[in-house]
Amino acid sequence: MSGHQPPSDVLVIGGGLMGTSAALFLRQRGVSVTLLESDLVGRQASGTNFGNVRRQGRPIGQLPLANRAIEIWRNANALLGSDVEYLQSGHIRVCYRERPEMADKMEAYAAEARHAGLELELLSGNALRARFPFLGPEVMAGSYSALDGHANPRLVAPAFARAAIRAGAVVHENTKVTAAAKVGDDFEVATADGRTFRATVLLVTAGAWGPLLSAQFGEPVPLVARGPNMSVTEPVPYAIAPAVGVMTPVEEETVYFRQVARGNIVLGGSTRGPAYPDLVRSYVLPQNTLSQLRQLRRLAPALGKLNIIRVWSGIEGYLPDSLPVMGPSARVSGLYYAFGFSGSGFQIGPGVGATMAELIATGSTAIPIDAYRVDRFPAAA
Amino acid sequence: MGQPDVIIIGAGPAGVRAAEALVGAGLRPTIIDEGRRAGGQIYRRQPENFRRPYGELYGTEAGRAKALHDGFDALAGRVDYRPETLVWNIADRHVWTAAGGRQQALPFDALLLCTGATDRLMPVKGWDLAGTYSLGGAQVALKAQACAIGRRVAFVGTGPLLYLVAAQYVKAGAGVAAVLDTSPFAARVAALPKLLAQPGVLRDGVALTLALKRAGVALHAGVEPLEVLGDADAGVTGLRFRDGRGRERAIGADAVALGYHLRPETQLADLARCAFAFEPKTRQWLPERDGDGRSSVPGVYLAGDGARILGARSAEATGRLAALAVLADLGLPVDAGELADLRRQVAGYARFAEGLAEAFPWPAAQAGKLPDETVLCRCENVTAGDLRRTVREAGAKEANRAKAFSRVGMGRCQGRYCGQAAAEVVAAEAGVPVEQVGRLRGQAPVKPLPIAIEEDAP
């Protein structure tokens, strides 16, 4: 397990949804790819998130990327040769009576989103409850996106990795990168087991671990690792098609849920817990579970009759403006980044992979990504 | 300085004896019990309005059961006893409890986990039919409610509980179709030198076997269970198995009691972030502890069958021993002679337990032979074939990976019942040792938590 490995055109560091989908789409463009994953593919943010395949609520400037992703999601099972439990069953965002200003924001957002190719239906509280009777009396208004939905995050990144391997990518799991540098025209990457990998292009898709690599190229990123707060109920008869979430400026109120076809209801949001990338551990704090349940009872009181049977978390990377780092390095040619998706990377993930593959293979993309520049943060004092 | 907060989880033999030692030293421990009345599983008390005498309920263990119950009753007023209370999480030096629809977090300086054991189960095709119970479940029905699980019950599995519960059913007048033990008789003979560490218990065990024979119950050793027979409407109608001579046979039965000795309830130790180690003799992951019960986490102690299966008598000793470790760590005086005596007792129990593990081995090889259509995870309805496909096609060779892809162990029991068998299925399919497959990580809540839970003000 030592010595120089066969070189490839692109070396991808990080086997989450961004890295595995980039690997597949690079192969589809005839580019040779090696992907290094320190653990197993899709185990942290990509595998432990809520599973929202949701466009509405994203910054308007991100909708072209989200629209590119939705096309991939619709064909995911055929593309991947594996069922990732994608249901295009709709997504509702609601707001509460005590925050009527949110309804105005919803209306303004819907008008802008229409121009960006996302059709939203605005509904009053009573109209919403007529259609979705599980919503509580505090719900004042809502915005329904018929063509959004949800999927099973545990399955998606591993399915992309298997498809990439079938398409000719080389994937090394349990391979921890210890150093990366540009030597001449090539990148040289050393791993903990003593191997050295070379490639002409380096793509960093290492999630919360991304800054460890960008810093080696003189590009520090102020990322904070946190863990999502997830719970699941016992299975009950399938009755709730859309994913449902609350639009609010108060973090504790931001609860959301979806029902999987098997019947379990998955809950997320309200608060996030501590995550320790160096230990590869994250925890759900009991008080966060309780605040999540309290908020869920407001949103959908009838769910108070159920039990949760399990909670979980994972390691996500958050940036101060909640936007990712995505695009070319500002300092080193041939170096690219796609990490720090701040808890909202799942839906756009396949679009990120396709866009990074396009950018690397052709040198440009029509998808706007300028807002995600790595050098947008003021230098640390 | 005020009194230290000492919490004991579990009120079986380990928890009660630990509480006695702490009260003896002038402390007032909190005892949290999932049960309605203290006693735990083996010395489970009947409901208040039942009047069966000790001898009828506990047989040869009547004296010990009464002593334990009396010992607990004598602590009244000197402990904070909380029955019917679930500990659903442990975090930040607090135990998080749920009782009567209300949640409360209790701080601790020292925490004793006396969480006991549940049945260790190896699936068999058809075990998801109505009428199949765990051995422990079959015993609880009898002990707590004076009910049998059927009129003609087949007892299948291995371990001392197999014979004990079958004999209790005979004594209670329930029909016993047969006792089918997967362990070969020769293993029991070979284990005799170690079993002689507890000659009294060995004698009681032999007496049970003789009583079953006298009652005309067919006893088979070295069997391989093949299928619980029946259908969705009728439930269990019989059992197909291969006998010790390799002949395939079938018997009629309207219920099956299934169990392969016991496994410790270790989820709370996991949530308390205790380190675990693989124990090759029983092929199980156990929380690490020193000889007196200290876990790898300062202030967290382990005792009784929840730490390692050594039996009820040993649990009384390890419970007291762990309490003495708490006292010593709090800087309170501990009698060195008593410590030495308890450690000596526990060593003897450990030798006997090793003999039991050799006499009644976990039939790991059965996992690889389960037909693909066998339901493995009953909560999530995952078959052995589903899990094997996950290993073959998605490359999941680790327990949590297999869970993520197939949902095995993801349901309301969180793998307590299927987890060990699932690990064996993965190991057999992947061709790797079972310790390499690892163990399912525990997650809160340990048991289902109502979404409508109300919170007490902090």
Image (cartoon, coloured by chain):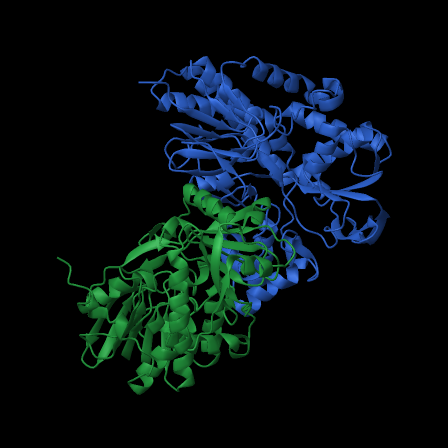
Chain colours: A green, B blue
Q: Is residue A336 left or right of residue B109?
A: left
Rendered location of residue B446, percent (x, y): 53, 41
Q: Is residue A202 left or right of residue A15?
A: left
Q: Is residue A363 visible?
A: yes
Give B101 or B434, whichever is nearer the viewer.
Answer: B101
Rendered location of residue B40, percent (x, y): 61, 28
To which quarter of the image does residue A225 belong?
A: bottom left
To which quarter of the image does residue A106 belong?
A: bottom left
Rendered location of residue B372, percent (x, y): 68, 62
Give A25 or A73, whichever is nearer the viewer.
Answer: A73
Give A15 or B360, whichever is nearer the viewer.
Answer: A15
Q: Quadrant of the C terminus of chain B?
A: top left
Give A295 or B214, whichever is nearer the viewer.
Answer: A295
Q: Is residue A195 above or below residue A43?
A: below
| Residue that appears at 55% across and 73% down | A82
Q: Quadrant of the N terminus of chain B?
A: top left
